[in-house]
Image (cartoon, helix red, strand yellow):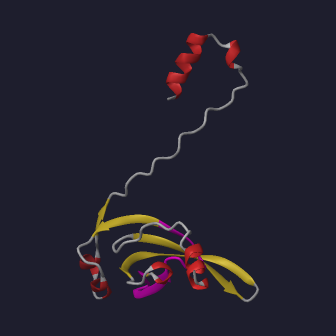
Amino acid sequence: MKALDIIHAETLKKVVPDVKPGHTVQVYQRIREGEKERVQMFEGVVIAVGSGTGTSKTFTVRKVVDGVGVEKVYPIYGSTIEKIVLKKEAKVRRAKLYFLRTAVGKAGRLKETMIKEIKAPKAEKADMGIKVEEVPAEVAAEVEQMAE
């Protein structure tokens, strides 16, 4: 196994959401300015997902700031990317949404769809300081049913 393959394998262990064109995402990127390091957020619409594979795969995010379009290309598995948060999904019929560069007003809107709900893990039962032996079996069974 080559050293490059080992590096690629380690990088690909990073958990990244499935980013597709039409998604509105927030990309949190670490930025180093001299001695200081901070995290900067960039929110926009994914207009393209690059054709690279593995660690070379990229995606392009676009937003409009004061009437000027700003696009940034991020590597999906980049070491400076802290996290990628999926905010909205939109129904699109193209792999590359470059038409959004020239679209103005209503033509530049995408039809949003609902984001699938992510179920939170079940909360663990709180310890109330009551031992199970002290509670009658019937009451304990009732409490168990209510907790579920």
Picture coordinates of residue 103, whole percent (x, y): 27, 84
User: For the point 25% across and 76% down, which residue is it?
Assistant: 106
Give the residue displayed 37% in from the left and 70% down from the top.
23
Residue at image location 39% in from the left, 86% down from the top: 67
Q: Is residue 69 above or below residue 76?
A: below
Residue 109 as seen in the image, left or right of residue 73: left
Which residue ends up furthest to the front in the rendered image? 1
Q: Residue at x 37, y 58 (%)?
A: 115
Number of residue marks: 0
- Give the left or right position of residue 131, taking residue 92 as reference: right
| Residue 131 lies in quadrant | top right
Q: Nearer the viewer, residue 122 or 104?
A: 122
Q: Which part of the image, by quadrant, shows the N terminus?
A: bottom right
Picture coordinates of residue 81, whole percent (x, y): 57, 76
Closest to the observer, 38 or 127: 127
x and y, in percent, of residue 65 in the image: 45, 83
In this view of the protein, which residue sits in the foreground, 2 or 41?
Answer: 2
Please state the horizontal and vertical placement of residue 83, each as a whole percent of the image: 55, 69
Q: Which residues are magenta?
A: 59-85
Q: In this view of the protein, which residue sits in the foreground, 62 or 142?
A: 142
> Is 135 colored magenta in this rendering?
no
Q: Specify the principal SS of the magenta part.
A: strand
Q: Is residue 138 above or below residue 103?
A: above
Does the segment drawn in magenta span residue 63? yes
